[in-house]
Image (spheres, grey):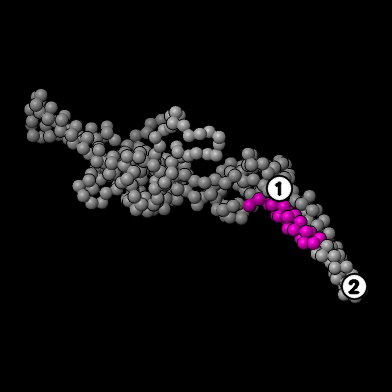
Amino acid sequence: METLMLLTYAALCWAVFKIFKIPVNKWSLTTAVLGGVLLIGHILMGMAYYHPASRKARIFYITTPILPNVRGLVTEVPVKPNVPLKKGDVLFKIDPTPYQAKVEEVKAQLTFAQKRLQDVIKLRKRAGGSKFDIEQWRKEVATLKAQLTDAMFDLNSCVVRAPSDGYVTHIRVRPGQMAVPFPIQPMMTFVNADTATLIAGFPPEPSSNIDEGDEAEVVFPAYPGMTFQGRVTKVLPALAEGELRPTQDMVSFNRQLPQGLIPAIIELDKNISSLGLPMGVDAEVAVYGVREGYWSHISIVRRILLRMITWSHFLRFH
């Protein structure tokens, strides 16, 4: 950015010297240099504080590790990689034979227990049977109903479904593999399509001038020459650099932690899903935090520089 401003100012000085035929000497050159230092320094400080920009912006998203609730042999994987899915679509299936057998066994026991309960109730009405037997069989029926619910849950878990709208990026599950409910080794990684969020990181100094509702502009290197309008919807109140986890380590200032950037969520005015940008792509963001007063006029320079940056993305050689 500074290089672009210096080059622009140098080109402007060259044009002024040529057009007005100003003699080149130590006085004119000193005036041009000092004027450039004061002017550019003034603009840079005003922009950095009141209209901050960030090159640390990215479209973040949430993934869900797919873990089966039951252990078993994978029999079918109907899902295709990177194909949009709806919530509830089948990801893969596990052999249900042992869990179906468990359901049938518990159902048989429950049917028998219910018949026995009816018998002891009739017996008490006719011959004064034991009240304890009735309570015991009622308890047995309730226990078997709970076991049946648990067995049905395991049987239904043999079909693993999509937790939300999204897609699976890499599919390494094949029929014949063993599915194990082990948290460290998920079977798939599901990408939640509705969680894409553009977050930009800003240095702490101008953070007091970034508020919810401030106008923002975004450029993506994948689309040179295009600028997208948006708004700041949220300035996150916590930084990862200050996170403390439940360990035995005490707070120490001897470790060299980075300064950290203030994360701000940017919402674009236009839906960019049709552009085909992959989630996780980086971006550059400018926020215009002042809408009145003297420093609001400096925003035009930030806007020009941002557009010069996006046009410079065409200059990419491999």
Q: Is mark 2 in CB contact (under 8 Å) with mark 1?
A: no
| Numbered tag placed on residue 131 in the rendering | none
Instruction: Inspect this view and state whether residue 299 appears.
Output: yes
| 10 Å crowding of disc 2: few (<14), some (14-19), many (20+) | few
View extreme (bottom): residue: 126
Residue 13, quarter of picture: top left
Residue drawn at 39 percent across, 35 percent down? 259
Residue drawn at 7 percent across, 27 percent down? 23
Please give the residue where the numbered disc 2 appears in the rendered image. 128
Which quadrant, please, contains the N terminus? top left
For numbered disc 2, what is the local secondary structure?
A: loop
Specify whether residue 151 is painted magenta: yes
Q: Is residue 67 above or below residue 35?
A: below
* Residue 137 in picture, x, y percent from top left: 83, 63
Residue drawn at 73 percent across, 45 percent down? 72
Read off the magenta span.
Answer: 139-161
Specify which label sits upstream in the sequence, 2 or 1: 1
* Residue 56 in picture, x, y percent from top left: 39, 39
| 10 Å crowding of disc 1: few (<14), some (14-19), many (20+) | many
Q: Nearer the viewer, residue 17 or 58?
A: 58
Please give the residue where the numbered disc 1 appears in the rendered image. 70
For numbered disc 1, what is the local secondary structure?
A: loop
Residue 313, quarter of picture: top left
